[in-house]
Amino acid sequence: MSARVLLVDDDRSLCEWLESALTKRGLTVTWRTSADEGFALLDAEDFDLVIADLNMRGMNGLELCQRIAGSRPDTPVIVITAFGSLETAVAAIRAGAYDFITKPFEIEALHLTLNRAISHRALRQEVTRLRRAVTEASRFGELLGASAAMRQVYDLLDRVAETDASVLITGESGTGKELVARAIHQRSRRAAGPFVAINCSAMPETLLETELFGHVKGAFTDARSARTGLFLQAEQGTLFLDEIGDLPLPLQPKLLRALQDRKVRPVGSDTEVAYDARLIAATNRDIELAVEEHRFRDDLYYRINVLQVHLPPLRERGSDILLLAQHFIEQYAAGANKPVAGLTPEAAEKLMSYGWPGNVRELQNCIERAVALTRFDHIVVEDLPEKVRAYRPSRVLLGGDDPTEVLPLEEVERRYILWAVDALGGSKTLAAQKLGVDRKTLYRKLGQYEGRTSVKDTKGS
């Protein structure tokens, strides 16, 4: 890791040795033999971190550390001393030091500490930048994100919004598919009309039919009055069918006919009524597989999939994780009237390393919880849910010298399949292609793995 290091120690020979050793490891080292000289140089130039000896003539390391913490709080200071004790270490940390190292030390141990400090500073700067970036970030309606993946989505949505064709939004649960549908509606020529949404998996077939198409008085026992269906309620606006992959098979031909003819027949009526509404549908399921398995009509699939927008999972959006986290912090801190300003670097690192199977919805829940629990002005690691704090990426153990690590072939297959799906962004279709199996086989195996865990899944390779 390349970085500029300021070394302050009155032992010239130690400075020369550390300069040589750390330069060989890619660091740029500048040294001074007094704290006054070191602080003056730091005031004039920018360094990524400072290494300061504790006992020096004139201003000592603790005093230097305090002055740096006051003037440049983003610059980590590592204090070194030949007279280490618990009291001294505590004093150094209270003075604002990032870490405390006792002489003599191994150069590799020091180098590792320096790299951690540099990463800490970079992440802290990123968190600070994100606080400014939230108000300036790329947005499309209520969608927020500046990653390359989201910029591609925004570009596609701009073009989709200009048309009146049916749209199918795909993506994992929690990625924000309804937000996309609302954003398309708000950018379209139908923005002045209503946006009507329904979850197709939330009600039984008979109720869903009357919700969509309406019914006339007396159509069934409880039909004491006529009801206008959602297609007509969305007149000159947008009808959003969420979780369309769960649409009951007997209802699918009726929906297809309504889309083809641009007319609906209320339940119990002999008359068709024309409607003018744009259809946007969404699903987190593999509809192509459902078509292959005859659980979803292919003609209906082609009718709703004129234009397709795929939302990337949160784990593929990079620093959008921190951008969204900062946005949620500001939202929930204001609602709770708590002075929570952001994340500590350590908490931010945990968020970045977690897999977010629940995507943006899970992140939002995590931040709401953290804001409610924190006692500080920044969210710390302890404020995060246990599964986020303890998360370790799964690894596929292919071999080793320890005979106790030899696994059954079935377990190796399980780990590899789960790793492959995760590595390919959760796409089961792509994973099946790469693994050389058909999707039915992959889905069957994944179904068998549900609820199964292994204590070795978190072990590094």
Image (tube, helix red, strand yellow):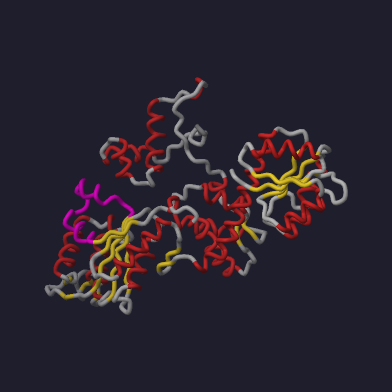
Tell me, yes or no, if residue 344 can be seen here: yes
Image location of residue 103, percent across then percent down: 78, 35
Q: Nearer the viewer, residue 270 or 89?
A: 89
Residue 195 sits in quarter: bottom left
Left or right: 187 with respect to 28? left
Q: Nearer the viewer, residue 455 or 344?
A: 344
| 239 is higher (above) or lower (below) than 434 | below
Residue 14 sits in quarter: top right
Q: Quadrant of the N terminus?
A: top right
Tell me, yes or no, if residue 223 can be seen here: no
Residue 331 sits in quarter: bottom right
Q: Is residue 374 magenta?
A: no
Q: Residue at x 68, y 36 (%)?
A: 21
| 420 is higher (above) or lower (below) than 154 | above
Image location of residue 49, percent across then percent down: 68, 49
Image location of residue 68, percent across then percent down: 75, 55
Q: Residue at x 69, y 34 (%)?
A: 107
Q: Which residues are magenta?
A: 284-306
